[in-house]
Image: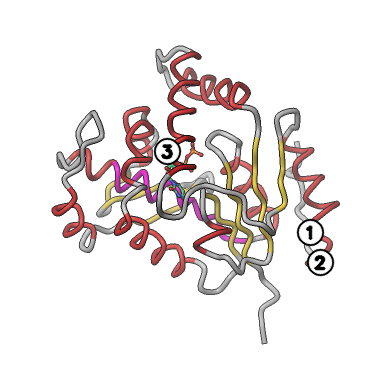
Amino acid sequence: MGSGKIIIAIDGYSSTGKSSFAKLVAKGLGYIYADSGALYRAITYFAYNNGFIDDRGAIDEEPLKKLLKIIKISFRNDRGGNSRTFLNGDDIEAGIRTSQVSGLVSKIAELGFVREHVNAILKQMAIDKGIVMDGRDIGTAVFPNAELKIFMTATPEVRAQRRFLELQAKGSKDTYEKVLEDLKKRDYIDEHREIDPLRRAKDAIELDNTFMTMEEEIEWLNKILLPNFNLEVELPKQ
Ligand code: CDP
């Protein structure tokens, strides 16, 4: 007999607010949150620090392929309940969010052996269902049978503005124009790669949040999609 728990796959472009939305949904349902992008970022961070990818994105595949089998990437929640990424026991959460890693990650994510490795970890995490996972190919390649699939979009300009503010808060000096250009570049590589490119699964419901607040997104989810599964996300009290 099933537990009644489902898999929720949330895919979409960068800076559409997938991870904030996915985290809130997971919390509200008592589900696990899984950030597939953090795995690609962790591998990029590892590759960069070991000289397997250079600043221009040239990759030395063989040593990466070998070492991928023995490194350990894991997630732990901090006291505030936020997920942090660890590499061989070291907290690398800040390291994987730099613009350096953001600029290279799509190159690493093009490699077939990297995608296979990440997918095996993701499948293990979802073994008992009750999970909200965000990424680029969750509804198309990782869990094509996920019970609920959402595809998030927003205009590139609004997404770049969100990312720009996020980076500024971290002390970054990147201009809005640079952020917009980087974002478009990454979207292009993600959409055009050979293996499991970013695209909307046929059965995914589109959520364009260009003009929506997070509360409105949760209201939309509760009204339109979750009643089918007898689920409801409670909004956190202000
Ligand atoms: O934070 P943001 O939404 O911009 O990106 P992310 O979710 O952290 O993902 C970083 C990068 O990892 C993406 O641009 C993709 O190149 C890659 N990725 C992927 O290929 N497949 C996934 N399921 C998740 C991420």
Q: Examine the image and state in which quarter residue 73 appears.
A: bottom left
Does ligand 1 reach within 8 Å of label 3's beta carbon? yes
Do residues under tags 1 and 2 come within 8 Å of each other at their CB atoms?
yes
Q: Where, quadrant-wise, is the N terminus in this rendering?
A: bottom right
For the residue marked with disc 1, what is the amino acid? Leu
For label 1, the residue is 226
The total of numbered circles placed on residues is: 3
Q: CA distance from mark 1 to mark 2?
A: 6 Å
Q: Is residue 124 left or right of residue 4?
A: left
- Counting from the top left corner in percent of width and height, residue 237 is at 76, 41
Quadrant for the C terminus in the image: top right
Q: Residues within 10 Å of mark 2 (few under 14, many from 20)?
A: few
Query: N-terminal of the two: label 2 or label 3?
Result: 3
Instruction: Give the number of the mark in front: 2 or 3.
Output: 3
Assess whether residue 42 is covered by the magenta stretch: yes
Image position, residue 233 (x, y; %): 75, 53
- Given residues 108 and 196, the one toward you in this image is 196
Q: Is residue 205 left or right of residue 126?
A: right
Q: Position of residue 19 (x, y in %)?
A: 56, 43
Q: Quadrant of residue 54?
A: top left
Q: Disc 2 marks which residue?
A: 230
Kindly identify the amino acid type of the residue bearing the numbered disc 2: Asn
Marks 2/3: CA–CA distance: 38 Å
For label 2, the SS is loop
Q: Residues within 10 Å of mark 3 (few under 14, many from 20)?
A: some
Up/down of 75 relative to 179, above or below: below
